Amino acid sequence: MSPIPTAGPRLEFCTDPGEFLAAAGDHLAADPVVSTVVTTNAHRLVSQRADGVTQPHRDWWLVVRDGSGTVVGAGMRTAPYAPYPPFLLPMPDAAAVALAHALHERGEEALAVNGALPAAELCAAETARLGGGRVEVDRHTRLHELGELVWPAPVPGGLRVATEDDVDLVAEWFGAFMDDADEQAGRPRGVSAHEMPDRAEMVRRLRAGWLWFWVDETGRPVHLTGAQPPSFGVARLGPVYTPPAQRGRGWASSAVAAVSARIRAGGARVCLYTDQANPTSNKIYAALGYRPVVDMANLVIVLT
């Protein structure tokens, strides 16, 4: 781990997710819902490293400490798609600005910043100022946690765990989910395609048993709901996709409720992200008992 000296908060970069978790684990575990994206990725990559999978050299993990050495923030840069945006968790304002300076001094180009507000906004704004550009919002997201589960009206069929034999359909629906999310949020279809997991990651998730179909009374898949395994006691749902011809029949609400209940029964809390520009999904999740926790954003830096 390499510390970056600052006048205020201290930034420490490391390339080993295990080292990162050892340093920041207590801080992350104190608010595991807000930390879910970072902790899920860290634990997944620790497991993959144990299996001999190597990370790209560009990847890093960030620990933010105050003057007393207490961890007060965290982040990562592990996105597998260009422009490889850093993802920031809540941190002091000064740390978010200092991160922009640290990346600039390292010669590390950052053309996007994602994560919790206001940290992501502050880092992106300073990055744009240093590089001579402007910040544009790609999307506003909102993290929700399930409170008291409200069961929807029953519908025919039930859950079935997706298997490796279903990889082609799962991959097709992952892609369609991203395209539809773009369209429903007023973006061109295909904008989010770069975020789609590759086939190896699809197979890994299927083998782990964290993807489910809702099947109708004939056994035909009509909906897909996925989840990430719990990290510090919190599991995150996604994707949630129903093909257009099957919408309006209650499949999504029933599947999300059933998957959420299964996760709860296993002793974990449940959370999910929504695109704030998608009123349909926000309405569905609110009706099931999901409540907002924190707003986040995906920000793009346009050089001028």
Image: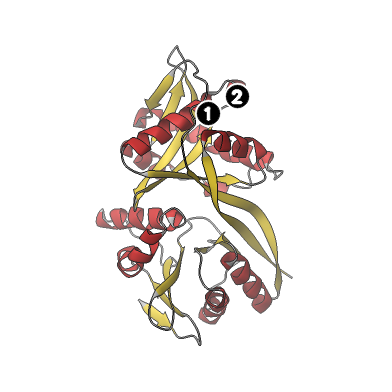
Q: Amino acid at mark 1?
A: Ala
From this view, report whether residue 148 is shown above or below residue 21.
Answer: above
Q: Residue furthest right?
A: 304
Q: Nearer the viewer, residue 167 or 39?
A: 39
From this view, report whether residue 290 is shown above or below residue 124.
Answer: above
- Residue 189 visible in the snapshot: no
Give the mark, 1 or 2, whose residue is nearer the N terminus: 2
Q: Nearer the viewer, residue 7 or 106?
A: 7
Residue 224 pos. (x, y %):
48, 30
Residue 57 located left or right of residue 193: left
Q: Which residue is mark 2?
A: 247
Q: Assign the C terminus to one quadrant of the image.
A: bottom right
Residue ID at (25%, 56%): 50
Pointers 1 and 2 in contact (C-beta within 8 Å): yes
Badge 2, how many Cα within 10 Å: few under 14, some, many 20+?
A: few
**SS for callout 2:** loop
Residue 299 pos. (x, y %):
63, 60
Q: Nearer the viewer, residue 115 or 59?
A: 115
Residue ID at (31%, 42%): 267
Q: Which residue is mark 1?
A: 252
Q: Amino acid at mark 2?
A: Arg
The numbered dot on residue 155 is none
**SS for callout 1:** helix
